[in-house]
Amino acid sequence: MMIRGLGIGALICSIFGCIWMLAAISFIDNERINLLPKVALGFGVLLIASAVPIIAMPAKKQPKSDAWTRRAKRLQIVNAVQWSSIAAAILLLNITHRVALIPWVISVIVGIHFLPWGAILRLTSYQLLGAAILALDLAALILPSETHRAFVAAGTGLALFCASCYWVLKAWIACSRHAPLHTGANQSSEGV
């Protein structure tokens, strides 16, 4: 299991989850309701703090396989398509004066990009994350336009936080299974 990979995925999703939560905070006018994304933002910061030690753990240096190199290239292509699609969407929505749709369109693109990521990495959790984001985006279509952007931003951020939390927990559990256990055999037996 690639423990560092889980940490990297958790860190990236936590950072982008925080960005989505900041957007949600900016879209919500009601101070009481605004407390929820602020609490979620704090949770995201904790996720970032828990992902960093996972990445910093010493790992055995292993040469990259040809299969991994091919996968990495495919992941780079998916990311390039995602970012260029986001840039094109922002440009088109600005030109057509439909800027209110920007968060929704970006969220759809982000959700879609997790589907091939899951297939390339053979990780169902990425595909579930993509499907969850897309389901939230579809649900947002039935909401009134005043709440649409805040729901999309908060929903996408929460989905990213859920995935990050899952990967952090999975990494820490894997680390605890591989860590040497302290049996107490080297401790003195005084007072026993």
Image (cartoon, rainbow, N blue to C red):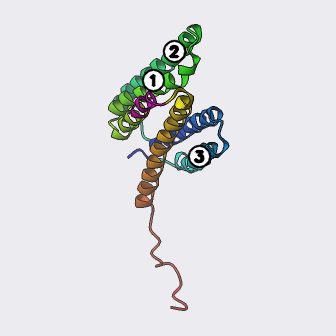
Q: Which residue is mark 2?
A: 89
Q: Which residue is mark 1?
A: 109
Quadrant in the rendering for residue 163: top left
Q: Give how far across and how far down residue 77 sits, in percent.
A: 43, 20
What residue is shown at x 67% (from left), y 43% (from top)?
31
Q: Earlier in the sequence, mark 3 or mark 2?
A: 3
Q: Residue placed farthest to the bottom in the image? A: 191
Is residue 108 one of those drawn in magenta? no
Q: Main secondary structure of the magenta part?
A: helix
- Of 13 and 23, the residue lying toward us: 23
Determine the image quadrant of residue 146.
top right
Q: Residues within 10 Å of mark 2 (few under 14, many from 20)?
A: some
| Image position of 142 (left or right of 12) | left
- Label 3, residues with CA under 10 Å away: few <14, some 14-19, many ≥20: some
Of mark 3 and mark 1, the one earlier in the sequence is 3
Labels 1 and 2: the sequence-earlier one: 2
Q: Residue at x 59, y 46 (%)?
A: 36
Magenta range is 135-143
Counting from the top left corner in percent of width and height, residue 47 is at: 55, 48
Do residues under tags 1 and 2 come within 8 Å of each other at their CB atoms?
yes
> Hey, what amino acid is under mark 2?
Ala
Q: Residue at x 52, y 35 (%)?
A: 151
Q: In the structure shown, which secondary structural element does the residue marked by tag 3 occupy?
A: helix
Placement of 168 over or under 88, stated as above or below:
below
What amino acid is at disc 1? Ile
Q: Which residue is mark 3?
A: 36
Residue type indicated by callout 3: Leu
- In the figure, 148 relative to 178: above or below? above
Give residue 122's position: percent from left, percent from top. Answer: 32, 36
Of 158 and 69, nearer the camera is 158
39 vs 10, nearest the viewer: 39
